[in-house]
Amino acid sequence: METVVCGKCGQRYAIRVESSSQDVGLSKKQASFVADKLVWDHIQERKHQGTIELPSL
């Protein structure tokens, strides 16, 4: 499990993987996607969503 923290407001998001074999590279890409999404939320002055749908990378 990976945790991403918004640098602006401190809100935390946990990235949970359903399968037992976790791909470290995929986890890093998903964490990067979430971090970018959080930055864009602040740029566009939107509140963060409760959950974020991850793209199939």
Image: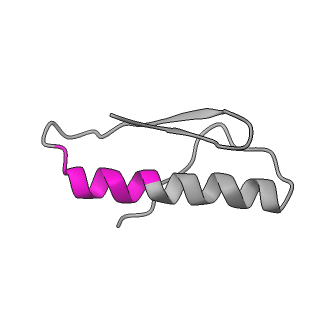
Magenta region, main secondary structure: helix
Compared to residue 20, the image places residue 55 above or below, namely below
Q: What is the quadrant of the C terminus in the image?
A: bottom left
Q: Name the outermost residue toward the front.
A: 7
Q: What is the quadrant of the N terminus in the image?
A: top left
Q: Name the outermost residue toward the bottom.
A: 57
Colouring of the image: one colour
Q: Name the outermost residue toward the right.
A: 45
Q: In which quarter of the image is residue 37?
A: bottom right
Q: Find out whether residue 26 is within the magenta segment.
A: yes
Q: Quadrant of residue 30?
A: bottom left
Residue drawn at (65%, 43%) of the image: 7
Q: Position of residue 43 (x, y in %)?
A: 80, 61
Q: Find out whether residue 10 is within the magenta segment.
A: no
Q: Where is residue 47 in the image (x, y as percent from the top left)?
A: 80, 45
Q: Quadrant of residue 44?
A: bottom right
- State left or right for residue 4 relative to residue 56: right
Compared to residue 9, the image places residue 57 above or below, namely below
What residue range appears in magenta?
A: 22-31
Q: Position of residue 31 (x, y in %)?
A: 43, 51
- State left or right for residue 36 relative to residue 17: right
Residue drawn at (66%, 33%) of the image: 11
- State left or right for residue 54 relative to residue 17: right
Residue drawn at (86%, 55%) of the image: 45
Closer to us: 22 or 25: 25
